Image (cartoon, rainbow, N blue to C red):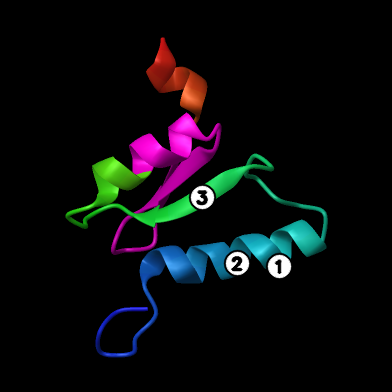
């Protein structure tokens, strides 16, 4: 959550992903982390997720998403 109590775009996208997974319609890999795209720590959090074998769903402020697989950055 943000400091003012509003939920972040990544938090909302993760909730939607949970609902889709429950319905058996998830478009995301099983091991994934959701990150807000425009934060100071995004790159560090992405590196940590990739090192743990997680894919990353980057969520823009407008709610659009981009999935990045760890294989895509490891060469």
Magenta region: which residues?
Answer: 46-68
The location of residue 14, given as percent across then percent down, is 55, 63
Q: CA distance from mark 1 to mark 3?
A: 15 Å
Q: Secondary structure at mark 3?
A: strand
- Image quadrant occupied by the C terminus: top left
Identify which residue is drawn at 42% across, 50% down: 65
Q: Residues within 10 Å of mark 1 (few under 14, many from 20)?
A: few
Q: Which mark is residue 16?
A: 2
Q: Tell me if 39 is positioned left or right of 11 in this view.
A: left
Q: Tell me if 41 is positioned left or right of 48 in this view.
A: left
Does residue 54 belong to the magenta stretch?
Answer: yes
Q: Is residue 75 above or below residue 1?
A: above
Q: CA distance from mark 2 to mark 3?
A: 13 Å
Q: Earlier in the sequence, mark 1 or mark 3?
A: 1
The location of residue 7, given as percent across then percent down, is 39, 80
Q: Which mark is residue 57?
A: none
Q: Viewer-proximal residue, 50 or 26?
A: 50
Q: Earlier in the sequence, mark 2 or mark 3?
A: 2
Q: Tell me if 42 is positioned left or right of 14 in this view.
A: left
The location of residue 22, given as percent across then percent down, is 80, 63
Q: Which mark is residue 19?
A: 1
The location of residue 61, given as percent across then percent down, is 28, 63
Q: Secondary structure at mark 2?
A: helix
Query: Disc 2 vs disc 1: Cβ atoms closer than 8 Å?
Result: yes
| Visible residue check, residue 68 | no
Disc 3: which residue: 33
Q: Viewer-proximal residue, 14 or 50?
A: 50
Query: Disc 1 vs disc 3: Cβ atoms closer than 8 Å?
Result: no
Does residue 21 belong to the magenta stretch?
Answer: no
Residue that extends furthest to the top in the rendered view of this protein:
75
Q: Residues within 10 Å of mark 2 (few under 14, many from 20)?
A: few
- Image quadrant occupied by the N terminus: bottom left
């Amino acid at each position: 959550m943000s400091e003012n109590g509003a939920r972040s775009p990544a938090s909302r996208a993760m909730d939607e992903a949970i609902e889709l997974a429950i319905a058996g319609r998830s478009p995301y890999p099983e091991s994934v982390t959701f990150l807000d795209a425009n934060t100071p720590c995004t790159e560090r959090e992405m590196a940590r997720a990739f090192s743990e074998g997680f894919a990353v769903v980057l969520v823009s402020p407008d709610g659009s998403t981009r999935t990045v697989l760890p294989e895509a950055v490891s060469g």
